[in-house]
Image (spheres, coloured by chain):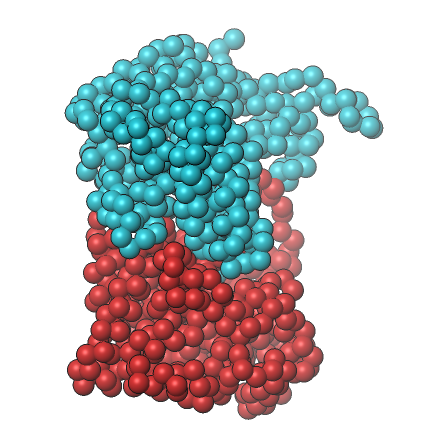
Chain colours: A cyan, B red
Amino acid sequence: MTTAIRMQPADQVSVRRNNLSLVLRLLHERGPRSRAAVAAATGLNKATVSSLVAELIDRGLVREVGTDEQRRLGRPATLLQLDGRNVVALGIELNVDFLDVLATDLSGEALVRRQRTIDAAGQSRQRTLTSLISLARQALDEVRTPATTLAGVTLAVPGLVDVGEGMIRLAPNLHWTDVEVRDRIVKALSLSVPMSVDNDGNLGALAEYRVGEFAGTPNLIFVSGQTGVGGGIIVDGHLLRGARGFSSEVGHMRMATDGPLCGCGRPGCWEALIGLKPLLHDALPDRAADIDAPDAPPEVKIREIVCRAEAGDQRALEALTRNGEWLGRGLATLVNLFNPEVVVLGGFFRDIAPWVLPVADAIVRKLTLAPDAGGCRIVVSRLPFSAAALGGAIHAAERVFDDPALVPFVTP
Amino acid sequence: MTTAIRMQPADQVSVRRNNLSLVLRLLHERGPRSRAAVAAATGLNKATVSSLVAELIDRGLVREVGTDEQRRLGRPATLLQLDGRNVVALGIELNVDFLDVLATDLSGEALVRRQRTIDAAGQSRQRTLTSLISLARQALDEVRTPATTLAGVTLAVPGLVDVGEGMIRLAPNLHWTDVEVRDRIVKALSLSVPMSVDNDGNLGALAEYRVGEFAGTPNLIFVSGQTGVGGGIIVDGHLLRGARGFSSEVGHMRMATDGPLCGCGRPGCWEALIGLKPLLHDALPDRAADIDAPDAPPEVKIREIVCRAEAGDQRALEALTRNGEWLGRGLATLVNLFNPEVVVLGGFFRDIAPWVLPVADAIVRKLTLAPDAGGCRIVVSRLPFSAAALGGAIHAAERVFDDPALVPFVTP
């Protein structure tokens, strides 16, 4: 299946950049280790490693942290560790009912988080973007110092994105079509670094693949429960994107020919069966009037379902069982198609997992052709943050891992 | 998304093997060209290319074929071309109602094809495997000479395969579970070369990706209409396999909660709605008794539907429309999940395409979230052979493209 024919000799500058990147990623992904261990893992000779490490230290990206006590022979070796404190990466999630801005350092440690409840479907685009820009500016002002380098900014949106153009092509639940967001935000924030826009499910999957409980699992599916049901799919360690970047629209799998109407205008989408609104309406029929009101954040509404379920409310329990059944049917199709090692459920599925996960899991096992569901595990996300904003920050930080020389030398 | 950390220096033997492979693949995939053009495309220097080409000529894998008339400056250059005549690759398809054995040369040119109608679900496994082995032996006897090298043998089966073990894990329509096929066939044919077993949909997709009308399209889905509905999915130029190789079971996507019963024992699978049997029963109700009889090959039965449709038979036309509708609904899910450039329909869908394709295409356009179905085209396969047997032969030939030195020097 190899199709790459062209081989090109790398010039010396790009060789050094690649090697700096290799060492920085190694320390990030595999943790602290000695120069000798870096040399062994990368195949680079020790003199080259010493020179690369010296440059990374001078750029404030790596620091020495004590010695390796487990070393059995010879002198204890000095350990090297990623030092991400001088770098800031910004992830922003724009969703139907909330904005979430997360600034991290290079290692992915949270520095600042700002959230706001909004009603993106009910208010003007301009108002939503103004809120977003204001929140992002606050976060940046709080974390940036003269010594920090901003790696990049990545925005997560619930819809189809033209990644190249930084445009939202179609976000059904926002009612947005063909909106240029990247250039507008870059201008408003006077950004001098690249900004990316990507689908929230993709960035959620990236977060799970990089720092979630099942980080590094080659075939991982992330399904996020919000107003919409988004998803991101890792295939053999790479994010599935498809021809135009419009893949992984799991929420729009067809589950029934005449099911309830979806936000996209079609009947029978998975999202219309297991998303936030159908669940709320099913579980809280007496609160129907409040559910579509934009004032209460979704967590509050979900909490009410959980309270009622814990109190044994029959209607809530039945609604959760139905949600679990439809969840399982859709997951079975994903498992039959992708044969993943793991499916990670995020968003409100984390809250209702005690009720829906056992139901969904049993159905996946029953409806998957491969015995034992092909070995797939269905789990809930353990990430502490909104996965999409964190995925955005991780994505934004990539630029420095790709080219550590972007970060200037630290003046002593 | 880069996770490969370890770099290893290649030793000289493997460097030469890689370079021989690179040159042979270049001539195969991009067609005849001069030594200078090979050097330019690979980045190898001209002396190295000359030495590699000399070895490939000595092994009978490349030949000189006239001169490049389009060359504008200097002497006309001698063109090099893949010469696959000394190599044989064998692809075998085992399906519910037929066996298909195809021997090709290295270039994929058909040398011998042997087919037989069987009733794999109704007869013993032993009988089916005996037929298969006998057919394969006939084909091999016919094409092998003392001068030929057998590259390999690859068997396509309609079910879940443990590729590492060469075992069929589960083939619902054959009613086979956990059958060791590879070792049995290797022994019976006294093969001294590796044999592989793979899913028929995967090998069909490989054939389309390598030599079909849309060869080289990075995101391509192949859907095959047989007794079962199989599929194979190319993602970014690589065959999707998943955690254990059980991916791409498109026939078992859940389309309806209480649909007709599938061969796998579950209701509502796509295959139970659009496969051969449901179509035949729907289109030819007066022939119900004959449809499940194993004597007539499926092409004959499909031809009867086509004849009736051409004659304007209302029942046949309605059945084809229903088939197209369900086909479109399932394809829409695939298009929403994978955003492929193209979906290629094989098997009996080629015959009924004039009726079902327009219906399915319109539904895909309607049910896909991305505008214009994300740019996806739905087409029928133009491959002259059963795609899975051809994919098997292509897969088997890979071994020589990976390591051309497996083919001995030609004695003058």
Q: In this view, does B20 lie above or below A364?
A: below
Residue A91 vs B145, above or below: the answer is: above
Residue B390 in sight here: yes
The residue depicted at 59 percent of the width and 65 percent of the height is B169
User: From what the image shows, is residue B346 above or below residue A96?
Assistant: below
The one of A13 and B322 positioned closer to us in this rendering = B322
Task: Tell me: residue B54, above or below residue A412.
Answer: below
- Quarter residue B301 falls in: bottom left
Side of B187 relative to A241 (left or right): right
Residue A309: image x %, image y %?
46, 30
Name which quarter of the figure residue B35 lies in.
bottom left
**Front in this rendered view, residue B145 or B42:** B145
Q: Residue placed farthest to the right in the image? A: A73
Name the residue rendered at 41%, 58% in the picture.
B253
Residue depicted at x 18% and y 85%: B311
Q: Nearer the viewer, residue A311 or A24?
A: A311
At which x and y percent is residue B327? 31, 64
Q: How many labels, in total?
A: 0
- Picture coordinates of residue B57, whole percent (x, y): 53, 75
Point out the image quarter for the C terminus of chain B. bottom right
**Is A384 left, or right, of B216 in this rendering?**
right
User: Closer to the camera, A376 or B231?
Assistant: A376
User: What residue is drawn where x is 58% and y is 58%?
Assistant: A371
Q: Where is residue A178 in the image (x, y as percent from the top left)?
A: 19, 38
Lateral position of residue B24 relative to residue B218, left or right: right
